[in-house]
Amino acid sequence: MCGVSAVFALLDVLKDEDFQVLKSMCAVLRHRGPDQERLVCDRIFALGNTRLRILDLSESADLPMVSDDGKVLLAYNGEVTNFVELKQEFRLEQKHPFRTDSDTEVLLHLYEELGIGFLQHLTGHFAFVLVDLNLRKAFCVRDFFGIRPLFYTVTKNRLWVASEIKALLEVPGISRELDLEGLFHYFTLL
């Protein structure tokens, strides 16, 4: 299990306090990934990951993972159970030098080859934030059933994303009080 966190500036650039909040969010998620913690920061986004080393124990597989050209970044939590088959089916090793034996790197290269349509090929449970600097787009994705959850909130021109709600409570201005009307709407839809 790993922990994913991210912040995106919607209208301006990130400030030092945004990076500090993201660090706090990662600290809250440390129990999900005590083996490694890293932030990758830019002017308009920052990704955080805590990692529990399971598949590939090497530091090469640490997260967030960045493509060889530095244009695609992936903060990831989960397990893609068919990653070996996908690696073979799309001949990824012939097109990309692999540094790891992880499903994360397969996802990264699959995206580089197929774009966001690669999602239709995935089997497993996962949640991730992928940033494509070439397209200037970010994708926040989770498996269909939400086995690996991903939560978000928007405050003061910032989009905040995390694997757990309690990490989002680190964001200034997020209320810890129960929203009874929201709870009513949630249970009405069940």
Image (cartoon, rainbow, N blue to C red):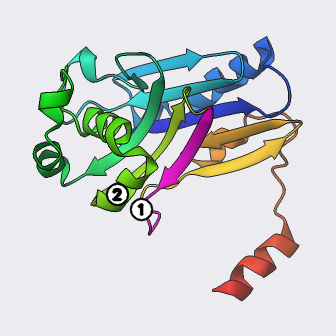
Furthest-top residue in this view: 16
Instruction: Give the percent coordinates (x, y) of residue 146.
Output: 47, 63
Left/right placement of residue 180 relative to residue 49 reads: right
Relative to 126, residue 19 above or below: above
Left/right placement of residue 143 relative to residue 5 reads: left
How many tags in the picture?
A: 2
Q: Mark 1 and mark 2 in contact? Answer it, CB < 8 Å.
A: yes
Q: Give the quarter of the image for residue 161.
A: top right
Tell me which residue sits at (18%, 45%) in the image.
Answer: 90
Label 2: how many Cα within 10 Å (few below 14, some 14–19, many 20+): some
Residue at numbered disc 2 = 125
Q: Return the disc, 1 or 2, that comes first in the chain's sequence.
A: 2
Label 1: state its secondary structure: loop
- CA gap, disc 1 to disc 2? 6 Å
Residue at numbered disc 1 = 147
Label 1: how many Cα within 10 Å (few below 14, some 14–19, many 20+): few
Which dot marks residue 59?
none
Q: Which residues are magenta?
A: 136-147
Return the residue nearer the eye: 43 or 40: 43
